[in-house]
Image: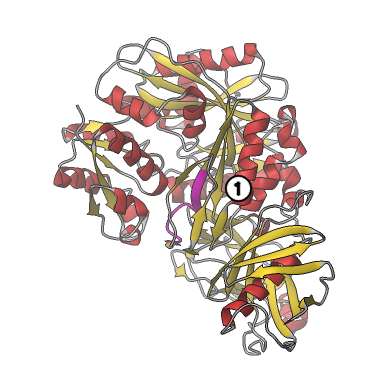
């Protein structure tokens, strides 16, 4: 029997495993980098072991340190979570060699699926349907579009879609470079890119006694940068025949490699209903809660059951209802999915949904790890009910701090293509992102008015209304690129605000304002953190898909600093990160075209391409590969022809 578990991971998955361990009476051990010293998973564990350093390569990816930590803490088992070393066969073997229980599949099974190219060869022998690989040296126009993929790793790293044959060679090099940087393995391969395909997967669970459960299907088609955003179980709109095919193929894959424990077999389902094996993840998936909700299971508890050598029941429980999960990321979808950093002041969801989070109020969102803050999961008897429940919970959530993808999630869940299961495919965001991220000022002005009124009450010695007419008050706020200049007057006759003829003040305090807006009573919660103000309110009835339920404002100074300027053409780091590479052959003085990639910045497990804002001359390139930069650091300067003068003329 396992008595103490070390989780060789961090954040949300570490907390998830600890929760089950506590319920089973198993003691818990956390590990942490210096950046995570005060993280929730460390605070919640029974004991913790420091891994000196901040970077994953020095901490969570050091298998020797993790095994040593387990021994030092007296743990008798290691759970790898997901990511980091969860699919590293050498680490799994090292755990077993140290006399510890590995809560995962056998090292040989991990090794069999570690390379996507070798996994496909093995699956072909087991009769699992596959996409035929494409020899890049012999590819023709008829083969387009193509998908370049890294043989190792996942998460969208080292993956490129190629629509033009001339771009194939460059994309092969770029994918190989990214794969080598991310996984230490630059091997890539090419296969057909299935337009209009769906990402459907099957959860499996196998014991050491010959039992293999196939726990239904999940649809994970809504992805950004080939990384999942919204997942659901069961996958909607599949025929019974296709479900049977997927379950049978997943079981064949598991038996072919002698699998034990929890795992996921991923498929691409074409528009005509044919399924093709993509890969097998030999670990617990991020989206496992939707399967737990539908089957009424605790997959972590079952992982422990299998690791202890106990058998599963002959058959799993029957599924019931529908579950949908949304990944809440600290990122700005409208700005190329840029990760966001800073203090998460508040994260609160209404009752009735499951929240699996790696952070709590007051935590700092840094640059070292994935930008996912939390997963929000809703279950209901039907898909429509589950989707409505999740969208409503996200809309009513209070999320104060860095910019998140919350609004994108709500709009996605309510989009006509998502509510129609027959329209689901992996191209959802390629088609709809501009619409889903379109900024709107509709209704935001009254939120700014509420912010101003709360601020006025907080600054007033007495609060409430004055007995004599006040002078006009003025405040300016900015939200989503729009400025709101609020001018109002409070007196014995109530509120008089420019541009708000139908608004009446019912009550106000420093953290709550109640207004009557066009005859409807609306209650606004106001929270201020320095020069940032978050205003939340229940969604306005009939407000439409773009009407806000919350706004985050920046209080603008009355007199802006005239020195806060940068040289024209300056490219500044949008976030803290590491320069991973410079465009080949690029040096100061080079001519560049508008949109030409100049360098790549890595932050929060994602690469961000920095491109030339306009055609001109690269007059400064003060950074190099491996250099760490802070937000706002100068990366390059591109002088347009008019500014570059003779230098451009000479270059021509």
Most foreground residue, 199 or 616: 199
Does the segment drawn in magenta span residue 372?
A: yes
Give the color scheme: rainbow, by chain, secondary structure or one colour. secondary structure
Corner quadrant of residue 381: top right
**In the rendered image, which residue does mark 1 sit on?**
394
**Can you say whether 421 is above or below 360 in the image?**
above
Q: Is residue 569 visible?
A: yes
Q: Residue at x 18, y 46 (%)?
A: 68
- Residue 123 falls left or right of residue 160: left
Q: Residue at x 70, y 38 (%)?
A: 427
Q: Residue at x 30, y 49 (%)?
A: 44
- Residue 49 falls left or right of residue 480: left
Q: Quadrant of the N terminus?
A: top left
Q: Residue at x 44, y 32 (%)?
A: 115
Most foreground residue, 650 or 457: 457
**Can you say whether 595 is above or below 72 in the image?**
below
* Rendered location of residue 217, percent (x, y): 55, 23
* Rendered location of residue 47, percent (x, y): 22, 49
Does the segment drawn in magenta span residue 542?
A: no
- Residue 524 falls left or right of residue 63: right
Instruction: Determine whether the residue tagged by mark 1 lies in a helix, strand or loop.
Output: helix
- Circle 1 Cα neighbour tier, 10 Å, few/some/many (<14 / 14–19 / ≥20): many
Q: Quadrant of the C terminus?
A: bottom right
Q: Which range of residues does the magenta coloring cover?
A: 364-375
Corner quadrant of residue 78: top left
Most foreground residue, 422 or 113: 422
Corner quadrant of residue 227: top right
**Can you say whether 38 is above or below 111 in the image?**
below
* Rendered location of residue 330, percent (x, y): 54, 56
């Amino acid at each position: 029997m396992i008595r103490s578990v070390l989780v060789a991971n961090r954040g949300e998955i570490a907390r998830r495993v600890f929760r089950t361990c506590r319920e089973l009476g198993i003691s818990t051990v956390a590990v942490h980098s210096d950046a995570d010293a005060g993280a929730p998973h460390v605070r919640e564990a029974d004991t913790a072991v420091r891994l000196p350093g901040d970077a994953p390569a020095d901490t969570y990816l050091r298998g020797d340190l993790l095994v040593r930590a387990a021994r030092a803490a007296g743990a008798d088992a290691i759970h790898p979570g997901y990511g980091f070393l969860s699919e590293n066969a050498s680490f799994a073997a090292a755990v077993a060699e140290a006399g510890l229980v590995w809560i995962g599949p056998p090292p040989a099974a991990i090794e069999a699926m570690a390379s996507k190219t070798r996994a496909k060869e093995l699956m072909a022998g087991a009769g699992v349907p596959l996409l035929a690989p494409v020899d890049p040296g012999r590819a023709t126009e008829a083969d387009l579009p193509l998908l370049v993929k890294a043989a190792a790793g996942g998460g969208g790293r080292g993956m490129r879609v190629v629509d033009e044959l001339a771009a194939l060679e460059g994309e092969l090099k770029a994918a190989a470079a990214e794969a080598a940087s991310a996984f230490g393995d630059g091997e890539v391969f090419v296969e057909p890119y299935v337009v209009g395909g769906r990402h459907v997967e099957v959860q499996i669970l196998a014991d050491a006694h010959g039992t293999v459960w196939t726990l239904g299907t999940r649809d994970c088609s809504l992805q950004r940068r080939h990384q999942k955003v919204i997942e659901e179980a069961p996958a909607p709109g599949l025929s019974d025949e296709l479900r049977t095919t997927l379950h049978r193929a997943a079981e064949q894959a598991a038996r072919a490699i002698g699998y034990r424990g929890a795992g996921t077999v991923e498929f691409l389902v074409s528009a005509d209903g044919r399924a093709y094996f993509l890969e097998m993840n030999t670990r617990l998936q991020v989206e496992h809660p939707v399967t737990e909700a539908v089957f009424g299971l605790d997959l972590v508890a079952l992982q422990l059951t299998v690791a202890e050598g106990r058998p599963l029941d002959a058959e799993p429980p029957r599924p019931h209802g529908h579950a949908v999960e949304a990944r809440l990321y600290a990122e700005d979808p409208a700005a190329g999915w840029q990760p966001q950093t800073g203090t998460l002041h508040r994260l609160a969801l209404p009752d009735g949904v499951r929240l699996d989070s790696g952070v709590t109020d007051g935590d700092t969102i840094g640059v070292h790890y994935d930008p996912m803050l939390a997963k929000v999961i809703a279950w209901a008897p039907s898909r429509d009910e589950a989707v409505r429940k999740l969208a409503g919970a996200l809309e009513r959530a209070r999320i104060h701090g860095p910019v998140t993808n919350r609004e994108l999630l709500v709009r996605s869940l309510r989009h006509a293509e998502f509510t129609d299961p027959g329209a689901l495919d992996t191209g959802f965001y390629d088609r709809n992102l501009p619409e889903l991220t379109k900024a709107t000022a509709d209704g935001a002005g009254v939120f700014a008015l509420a912010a101003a009124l709360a601020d006025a009450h907080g600054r007033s010695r007495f609060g409430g209304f004055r007995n004599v007419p006040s002078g006009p008050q003025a405040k300016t706020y900015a939200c989503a690129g729009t400025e709101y200049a609020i001018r109002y007057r409070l007196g014995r006759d109530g509120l008089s605000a420019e541009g708000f003829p139908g608004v009446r003040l019912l009550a106000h305090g420093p953290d709550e304002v109640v207004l009557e807006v066009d005859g409807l009573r609306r209650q606004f919660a106001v929270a201020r953190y320095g020069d940032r103000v978050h205003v939340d309110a229940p969604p306005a009835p009939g407000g439409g898909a773009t009407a806000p339920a919350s706004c985050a404002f920046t209080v603008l100074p009355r007199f802006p600093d005239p020195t806060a300027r940068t040289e024209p053409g300056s490219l500044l780091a949008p976030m803290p990160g590491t320069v991973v590479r410079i465009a080949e052959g690029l040096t100061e003085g080079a001519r560049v075209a508008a949109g030409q990639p100049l360098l790549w910045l890595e932050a929060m497990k994602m690469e961000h391409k920095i491109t030339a804002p306009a055609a001109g001359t690269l007059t400064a390139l003060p950074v190099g590969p491996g250099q760490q930069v802070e937000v706002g650091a100068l990366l390059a300067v591109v002088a347009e022809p008019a500014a570059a003068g003779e230098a451009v003329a000479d270059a021509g």
